Amino acid sequence: MEMELEMKDELGSTVERLAAAAGLLEQAVERLAQRQNDFAVDAEASIGRIVATVERQREAELEEKLAAAEAQIAELKAAAASVPAEVTHGRKTLPVSMANLLAKQGVTVETMEAGAVDAALVSLSVEQRIAVKAQLMRSGLLG
């Protein structure tokens, strides 16, 4: 009987130690879960700051590009406004048929001079030459 009592006491103390160990394990698990949660919150905050920084940089870059484009548009508008209306007669381009006709004769819009145009139009009739020159003058490419 005494042996039974000793075994019960030993068993009781073992159960108590196991219960205490289980309690410590539960506390450790709770601390680990809290640390993991804190880490996740910190990581999310860090990612949010990084994203905000990248977005601010991208916005600044886009604003710079927009300002440059607006400045270029303003320059082009100012340059277009300085061209007298009587020179262009409201036209800004040469008709495709005229450009093709001149290109066949070796004259491009960029290199157009009165002498080159006359030389290119030698093979045309007088009426055709007059029509081509009139079209060039209306488009503002020939003064």
Image (cartoon, helix red, strand yellow):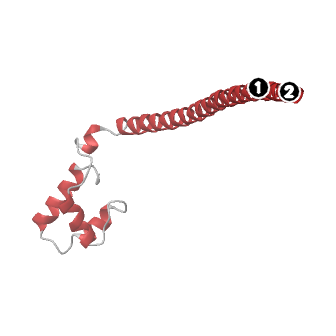
Which quadrant holds the N terminus?
Answer: top right
Mark linked to residue 1: 2
Residue 83: image x %, image y %?
A: 34, 40
Q: Are marks 2 and 1 in contact (CB under 8 Å)?
A: no
Image height check: is 87 above or below 64?
below
Q: Residues within 10 Å of mark 2 (few under 14, many from 20)?
A: few
Front-most of residues 10 and 81: 10
Residue 78: image x %, image y %?
A: 41, 35
Observer-side mark, 2 or 1, equals 2
Mark linked to residue 84: none
Q: Residues within 10 Å of mark 1 (few under 14, many from 20)?
A: few
Residue 5: image x %, image y %?
A: 85, 25
Q: Is residue 47 left or right of residue 118?
A: right
Residue 107: image x %, image y %?
A: 30, 67
Q: Is residue 42 left or right of residue 52?
A: right
Front-most of residues 141 and 41: 41
Q: Residue at x 27, y 49 (%)?
A: 140
Mark 2 lies on a secondary structure that is loop
Image height check: is 83 above or below 48?
below
Q: What amino acid is at disc 1?
A: Ala
Front-most of residues 22 and 123: 22
Which quadrant of the structure image shows residue 110?
bottom left
Mark pair 2, 1: CA separation: 26 Å
Give whichever of discs 2 and 1 has the lower sequence position: 2
Mark 1 lies on a secondary structure that is helix
Q: What amino acid is at disc 2?
A: Met
- Outermost residue on the front side: it is 1
Mark linked to residue 19: 1
Q: Is residue 92 left or right of residue 57?
A: left
